[in-house]
Image (spheres, grey):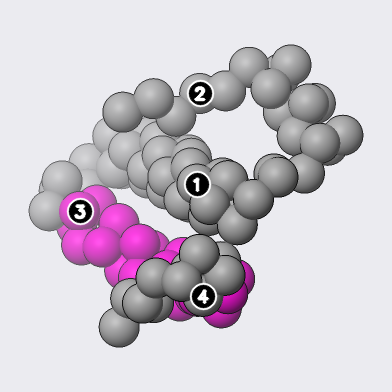
Amino acid sequence: METARTLLEDIAQLFAAPATPRDQLDLLRRDRMDAEAEIRSVLDRLASKYDVPSEDVEETMNSIGVAIGDMTYEPETEYLEEIDVKPPV
């Protein structure tokens, strides 16, 4: 899973919005994965520092994944509707 993007790619995104709803949906999903990866990294450091069991980190990550999905549900649904695909339930 590739989560790191180059600075050049990030700068390019500022000047060029995704051209199609499919591109916007792909970008949203990549950004969600990047956010989860960054959060996971922080949680892993905390767990290591304070000897927190990995099961607790996994449980927290599951909750975070749900929260990020809830937070981005509306734009994802809009992109899916524009693509003419049924939104996730």
Which stretch appears magenta?
Answer: 56-78
State yes or no: residue 77 in magenta. yes
Choose the circle earlier in sequence order: 2 or 3: 2
Which residue is depicted at the point 63% across and 17% down?
Answer: 6
The nearer-to-camera label among 4 and 3 is 4
State yes or no: residue 87 in magenta. no
Task: Using the image, tell me which numbered label, if any, was put on residue 83.
Answer: none
Q: Are marks 2 and 3 in contact (CB under 8 Å)?
A: no
Residue 69 is situated, as x and y percent measured from the top left of the image, at 42, 68
Q: Which residue is mark 1?
A: 26
Choose the circle earlier in sequence order: 1 or 3: 1
Q: Which residue is mark 3?
A: 58
Mark 2: few, some, or many residues within 10 Å (few <14, many ≥20)? few
Choose the circle earlier in sequence order: 4 or 1: 1
Please name the amino acid that badge 2 sits on.
Ala
Q: Secondary structure at mark 1?
A: helix
Q: Secondary structure at mark 3?
A: helix
Q: Which residue is mark 4?
A: 81
Whether residue 39 is visible, yes or no, is no
Whether residue 75 is visible, yes or no, is yes
| Residue nearest the viewer, comparing 3 with 83 | 83
Mark 3: few, some, or many residues within 10 Å (few <14, many ≥20)? some
